[in-house]
Amino acid sequence: MAPRFYRKLAVLAKIETVYGTDPTPTGAANAIQMTNATVNPLEGEQVSRDLMLPYLGMQGVILTGTYVKIDGEVEIAGAGAAGDAPAYGPLLRACGLAETITVGTDVQYDPVSSGFEAVTLYFNHDGVNHIALGSRGNVSFSLVPKQIPHYKF
């Protein structure tokens, strides 16, 4: 098998109108420029069966609460024009922030306590596609002096 080149990746994100339904993001409209992006297609908790067996060896486990984990960083920057939402806006919305657009003026993101939105994420790593429906997440800020500020998802 040929090696995969980690710098050859693409991340697309689009808000779902119906939770868990793929809105089919496109590269032209929904691409997000990320750094340090990683995907783990199968995360979750394991429950050991703890069976009494007549031999030594692995009993196996049952996976519970499985999910996909995608991590990455996005530089904090505007969209370029006043009143335009940035390309990473869907990620912020999926992290429990409501987007308020004032045309020609600004875009604000405020925390919500209900009505959370979800995104569909397409993660392409050197030709291997990973699609995550109904994605929600967390965001934190990295504001280090003399470095590029960024969001961590």
Image (cartoon, rainbow, N blue to C red):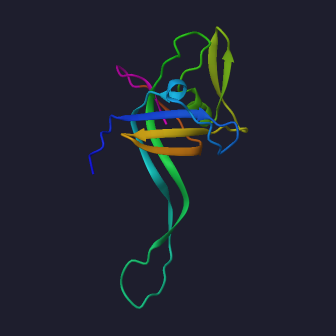
* Residue at 34% over, 35% down: 8
Residue 152 place in picture, x, y as percent: 46, 34
**Quadrant of residue 116 in the image?**
top right
Q: How many marks?
A: 0
In the figure, 57 relative to 36: above or below?
below
Residue 97 place in picture, x, y as percent: 63, 31
The residue lying furthest to the bottom in this view is 54
Q: Is 45 positioned to the left or the right of 128 in the image?
A: right
* Residue at 43% over, 34% down: 10
**Quadrant of residue 30 in the image?**
top right
* Residue at 59% over, 10% down: 82
Please name the predominant secondary structure of the magenta segment in the image. loop
* Residue at 49% over, 83% down: 51
125 is within the stretch colored magenta: no
Q: Which of 147 and 2 is in front in this view?
A: 2
Q: Is 64 positioned to the left or the right of 2 in the image?
A: right
Q: Which of 13 and 145 is in front in this view?
A: 13
Residue 57 place in picture, x, y as percent: 36, 81
In the figure, 2 relative to 14: above or below?
below
- Find the magenta span and give its range: 144-153
The residue lying furthest to the right in this view is 114
Residue 77 place in picture, x, y as percent: 48, 19
In the figure, 81 relative to 86: above or below?
above
147 is within the stretch colored magenta: yes
